[in-house]
Structure formats: C-alpha cells, structure tokens
Image (spheres, grey):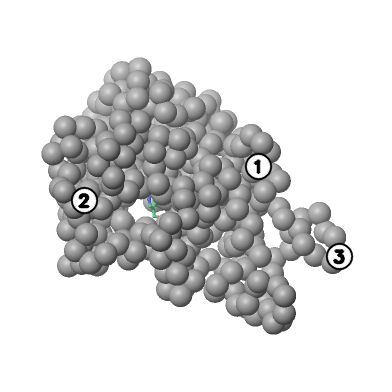
C-alpha cells in the first residue's frame, strides 16, 4: 500500500463487538485476565497499538513505540545507551533535545556536537567506540539538510547506530530507513498531530534488536506514554497527513520564492529554493521540501519583532506543523544562550490560502 492508503486504513483498527466504522477510544486502564494480551494500559493500549502500527508502516520500519512527547521519545534513546557511550549529535538540533544532552544526560554520555552538513567534520568526530549518530534533517531552526545517503553508508561501515529526527520531513516526504537509519524519531506534536492540540512522540525501528527491547522497556516501565485519547487524536490526524503535507509544501515554496525576491529580506533558508545549499541533496532524498522556512529580515531585533507583531494571519507563537501559520523570532524563544541571529525569523507555513498569506507578509514588510 502507498502512504495515503496506509494513513487511512492502518490508523483505524476496529476490534469491537458493536462493529463501529471508526475505532473507539479505549479508556480502560486495565483488562480482564484471560487469553488477551492486553493487561494494563501503561504497557499497551488498543489506540496506542494502532498509532504504533500505522507509524511503523509509514516509516517502513518493523515496530514503533509511542511516547507522551517528542522529548520523551528522544530521552528513551539516550536512556537506552550504555553509561559513558560516545554519541555524535548535530550542532543545529532541536533545542529541547540539546538541553536534555547538556543538562540531564551530560554526566552519563560522551557527547560531540558536529556540523552535519560537513561530512569531513562528522568523519573526524567518530571515535573507535562511537555508539550512535543522531541526525535531524531538515534541521531546526536553520532548515539544514544532512546527506542521509552518505551518512548512512558511513554509519554502516563503522557499525554505528544511526538515528534520524524526521519531525520536519514527516514519513510522507522522507523515509530515513531507506538510507540506512536504524531508528526514526518524531515529535508527533507537529505535523503528525497537525492541529496544535496534542503532544506526542514516536520512535520507529528498522529491526527488533536488544536495543529496541530496551526502548520498549523504557516506554512501558519508564511510563512516559501517551493517553488513549491522545493516540486517538493522532490516528485521526494521520488520515489527512499526506494531503496536509502537500498543501504545506506548496504554500511554503510560494512564500519562500516571494521572500527571496523581496528587498527587505536578507536571506531565506528553504531547501526548495535552487539557491539553497541543501537543495540538491534534499531533492535526492525527499519527495517535497516541507512547510518550514526561516529567513533573516533586514535590520535588528526590534525591526524583526515589529514585523512579526504586525502580521494578521501568522500567530506569533512557537511550535509548528499545524494547519494555522505560526511565526516567531527564534533568539527570543531560545533565550540568552541562543546561537540564532537576532533577526532570524522561523515560519511554520499553514494551510490558509497562500495569496492571503503573501498579501499579509507584503503589507507587514512595507
Ligand atoms: C518539537 C520538536 C521536538 C520535541 O518534541 P515535543 O513533542 O515538543 O516534546 C523534537 N524534535 C524536533 C525537530 C521538534 O521540532
């Protein structure tokens, strides 16, 4: 089956005596002892099973584990690593996961931050005992592209586990396992949920090895699991994911093109633009360029803030991947330790009519 069909049919697995067309939400925390494999909802729940199976199929993996948030999914991987393990992670990495590495597991893991767009830098960061390479492509907030194919080959040669945070691309635009990733991570809070009203995280594995068993134990016993209702909402959203993503890509491309030609804009970061350094690699590993873009507006932080607050259709809020357009000045959100330029603006392009969005941007710029 193709993604559109998987998204609709595997997100709905009815096993109910009343034969509803749509899978009900199973709120019960406990299940009758007997021949059924369900025991207690922290371990497994029917709605969570459905969410995990549709995500495993969309990512072309063999199994998935759902968590209460993207950060909980990321943490499960860091917790599954042996004490003192060396890992290589991107310099441009989701700041919440960086914070876990710098402030929570920094005394348990040996962590190297590397520019993943530079293969030589990655190669020279590898140690004989490197356990894991973490990728995020496209990355946040600079929308950088890592070469999944080349890094996949390198990781395989050195026998290093490869993880890809696929939140910005979603399984609709990119399947990192096709390029050798062993695990794929998602913040389901973003495009998979798609309506800015549910938190969730997903891990998908290529093979059910001992490392994966450890992750499943961290999920069930660690207990950072999503509720049945959250799983239901995510399954409901996944049904429209392929079509939402098409709309996000179309709108983002039009807006990136508009911004690139505008005099008040210094630089646009969007891999769909032929001028973008990641364009060729993105074309070779993605089926579309996504709905996220960043840009530098001419002027200082004040100018950037005034621009953001004069927009009418873009809400000034963090997060991304919802049907509504969001915009923010990154340095303001990331706080004093931010590496982002003060005039860097990140935009999550929504599914409004793109002419309305461009008209709004145009009037705020002039
Ligand atoms: C939001 C995000 C996360 C963290 O997910 P939460 O659901 O907020 O915990 C991780 N990676 C990326 C790329 C994200 O955008």
Q: Label 2, on which residue?
A: 130
Residue 357 picture location, percent across and down:
49, 31
Q: Label 3, on which residue?
A: 18
User: Looking at the image, which residue sits at the far bottom?
Assistant: 33
Residue 87 picture location, percent across and down:
23, 53
Label 2 near ligand 1 (CB < 8 Å): no
Disc 2 is placed on an element classified as strand
| 269 relative to 256 in the view: left or right | left
N-terminal of the pair, mark 1 or mark 3, is 1
- Asked if the residues shown at circle 2 and circle 1 are in contact, with their CB atoms under 8 angstroms apart, the answer is no
Residue pictured at 50% horizontal, 59% vertical: 65
Foreground disc of the pair 2, 3: 2
Residue 243 picture location, percent across and down:
61, 35
Disc 1 is placed on an element classified as helix
N-terminal of the pair, mark 2 or mark 3, is 3
Q: Which mark is residue 6?
A: 1
- 10 Å neighbourhood of mark 3: few (<14), some, or many (≥20)? few
Q: Which quarter of the figure is the N terminus placed in?
A: top right
Q: Which quarter of the figure is the C terminus placed in?
A: top left
């Amino acid at each position: 089956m193709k993604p559109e069909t998987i998204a609709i049919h595997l997100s709905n697995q009815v096993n109910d005596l009343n034969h509803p067309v749509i899978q009900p939400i199973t709120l019960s925390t406990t299940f009758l002892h007997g021949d059924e494999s369900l025991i207690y909802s922290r371990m497994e729940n029917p709605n969570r099973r459905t969410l995990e199976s549709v995500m495993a199929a969309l990512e072309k993996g063999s199994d998935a584990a759902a968590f209460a948030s993207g950060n909980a999914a990321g943490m499960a991987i860091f917790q599954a690593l042996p004490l003192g393990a060396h890992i290589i992670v991107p310099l441009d990495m989701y700041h919440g996961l960086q914070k876990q590495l710098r402030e929570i597991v920094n005394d348990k893991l040996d962590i190297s931050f590397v520019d993943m767009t530079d293969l030589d830098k990655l190669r020279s960061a590898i140690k004989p005992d490197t356990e894991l390479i973490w990728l995020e492509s496209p990355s946040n907030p600079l929308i950088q592209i890592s070469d999944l194919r080349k890094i996949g080959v390198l990781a395989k040669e050195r026998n290093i586990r490869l993880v890809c945070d696929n939140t910005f691309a979603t399984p609709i635009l990119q399947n990192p396992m096709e390029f050798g990733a062993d695990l794929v991570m998602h913040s389901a809070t973003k495009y998979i949920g798609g309506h800015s009203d549910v938190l969730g995280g997903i891990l998908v594995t290529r093979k059910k090895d001992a490392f994966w068993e450890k992750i499943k134990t961290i999920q069930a016993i660690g207990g950072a699991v999503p509720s049945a209702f959250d799983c239901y909402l995510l399954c409901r959203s996944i049904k429209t994911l392929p079509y939402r993503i098409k709309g996000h890509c179309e709108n983002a491309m039009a807006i990136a093109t508009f911004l690139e030609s505008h005099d008040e804009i210094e630089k646009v970061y969007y891999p769909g633009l032929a001028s973008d350094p990641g364009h060729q690699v993105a074309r070779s590993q993605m089926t579309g360029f996504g709905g996220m873009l960043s840009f530098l507006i001419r002027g200082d932080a004040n100018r950037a803030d005034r621009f953001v607050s004069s927009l009418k259709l873009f809400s000034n809020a963090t997060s991304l991947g919802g049907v509504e357009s969001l915009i923010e000045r990154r340095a303001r959100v990331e706080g004093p330790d931010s590496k982002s330029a003060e005039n860097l603006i990140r935009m999550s392009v929504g599914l409004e009519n793109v002419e309305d969005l461009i008209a709004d941007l145009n009037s705020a710029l002039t």
